Amino acid sequence: MIEIRRVFTQVEHIHHEFGPRADTPLVRGAIGAVLTNPFAGRYEPDILPMMALLDPVGVDMAHRLHAAMDVPLEQIATYGKGAIVGADGELEHGALWHVPGGYAMRELLGWKGSRAAYTAGKAEEKTGQPGNALSIVPSTKKVGPPGATLDVPLTNINASYVRGQFDAIEVRVPGAPAADEIVFILAMSTGYRIHARVGGLLAKDISKWDGLR
């Protein structure tokens, strides 16, 4: 059921946005895996079995993306995910990525809670500490043609309302997805927008409980 045709990785280093040059550039990266959509061209009522099969795909992509960004793991400050479904599929096929994509990055970054506790919504069972990817991974998805772009949202890994780290990265895999394919995407960055200056919570001020709300 899982057949990968291509894996596309992009990394950018942003030094300034027409203001002072940053001492350290913002590093943003994304990875997209182009998979055959086994449900293309038909309605399948039970698509959940594919979600579990995507778990190792997510783990592999998260590690590949971190390696491509070439920064220490503790410098990863934001994350996001998304999917572009080819024209013969439906939006719900992209939603299969929510658990495999999100948890792959959270576990890479040190999430210490259990998947079962999170899925059940039992905040009291979340045992993560600051720096352990406490926040939900923001997501977006759409149905699109080959070469379609997707703006993948990025928010802080521990408190999604760190205003200076609200961001997005534009992802496009040339020639994909074909009508019978899906592009599954993961994205991460090292933190604040260059020249961020609109106030709000700072990452250094996040408490253990901010990510659990």
Image: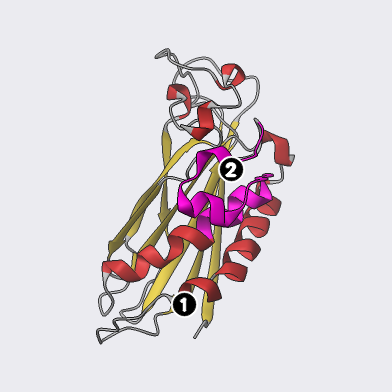
Q: What is the x, y in percent for residue 5?
A: 52, 79
**Badge 2: how crowded within 10 Å, few (<14), some, or many (20+)?**
some
Q: What is the x, y in percent for residue 39?
A: 34, 83
Among the 4 quarters of the image, the one containing residue 176: bottom left
Among the 4 quarters of the image, the one containing residue 28: top right
Sooner in the amino-acid sequence: mark 1 or mark 2:
1
Residue under the point 32% across and 62% down: 148
**Badge 1: how crowded within 10 Å, few (<14), some, or many (20+)?**
some
Q: Is residue 211 visible?
A: yes
Give SS at disc 2: helix
In the image, what residue type sits under mark 2?
Answer: Glu
Q: What stretch is highlighted in magenta?
A: 101-129
Name above or below for residue 65 compared with residue 155: below
Depth order, front residue of 172/97: 97
**Tag 2 residue:** 125
Q: In the rendered structure, does residue 126 fall within the stretch colored magenta?
A: yes
Q: Which mark is residue 50?
A: 1
18 left or right of 92 in image: right
Q: Can residue 31 be seen in this view?
A: no
Give SS at disc 1: helix
210 left or right of 91 in image: right
